[in-house]
Amino acid sequence: MSCRVLRSVTLLAAGWLAAACQEGAPTTPVEADLGAQAAIGAAGELAAQGGDNERAEALRDAANAIRLGIRPSQIEVKIKNEKFSYLAIVIGRERRSASGDAVLIRSLVAWTGRPTTALLHVSSKTDHALFGGGSSSDNGPGGARGQWKDLANSALWVATAGSADLELKSSGGACPIQPTADAALRCVLAKWDVRVNGNFQLVGDDGPDGNPIEIHTKADGVNGVVISPTG
């Protein structure tokens, strides 16, 4: 784990998102998973370096949420017909489109436990979306994006077909500490239903490499947050 990554993760702690122990709320004061924070923070830093600001922001939010106490939910992820246990949170960010309409950008971030050996990130702008929009940060209102990083083997798989359903089921309880860096934002705790059924293609130095693999997950009531403008 590099000093640079640790420094980036530490700086996230000074951001807008924090949590304390509340009965019935998706938060907990348990010891933070530094390995997961570092892995997700590093992925966000890499996305930022590549100009993918939307993905970078979602991953930074996820790393910050873990660091500051949002309790991840345990979900089952099926990869090539083998089942794995992952931890997961969903981050929702409300944005304004070019026409002024509110758009909720939702991102599932899931990872293996300790040590963190794999990271799954799926994002969309609608409850139901289809993979296949390429690597662009804006693949249309009905498009989904997905990446699975096999950290143990330094391999990146990108979703090329299939679907992603990331549906907000409930929200309302305020995050125990509201955004301080930007008073124009507010944070509420949320629960999400998640359905991912995708074909993921290995990305090599010269483009797609080999046959795709199938990745599936289905989970209800996944913990997360919704961040929206106060105005």
Image (spheres, rainbow, N blue to C red):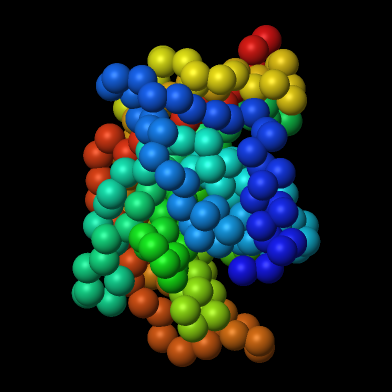
Foreground of the two, 172 or 22: 22
Foreground of the two, 212 or 35: 35
State whether residue 181 appears in this view. Answer: yes
Q: What residue is at 38 percent from the left and 33 percent from the top?
A: 28
Foreground of the two, 168 or 11: 11
Left or right: residue 98 versus residue 41 is right
Quadrant of the frame with the N terminus: bottom right
* In the image, residue 205 above or below residue 217: below
Q: What residue is at 42 percent from the left and 67 percent from the top?
A: 115
- Where residue 77 appears, as percent x and y from the top left, is 29, 61
Q: Which image quarter: residue 104?
A: top right
* In the image, residue 171 above or below residue 34: above
- Where residue 182 appears, as percent x and y from the top left, is 74, 22
* In the image, residue 20 above or below residue 131: above
Q: What residue is at 39 percent from the left and 63 percent from the top?
A: 114
Foreground of the two, 62 or 122: 62
Q: Which image quarter: residue 47?
A: bottom right
Residue furthest to the top: 231
- Where residue 18 appears, as percent x and y from the top left, is 55, 29
Q: What residue is at 28 percent from the left and 49 percent from the top?
A: 74
Left or right: residue 82 versus residue 192 is left
- Where residue 176 appears, as percent x and y from the top left, is 49, 19
Q: Which image quarter: residue 110?
A: bottom left
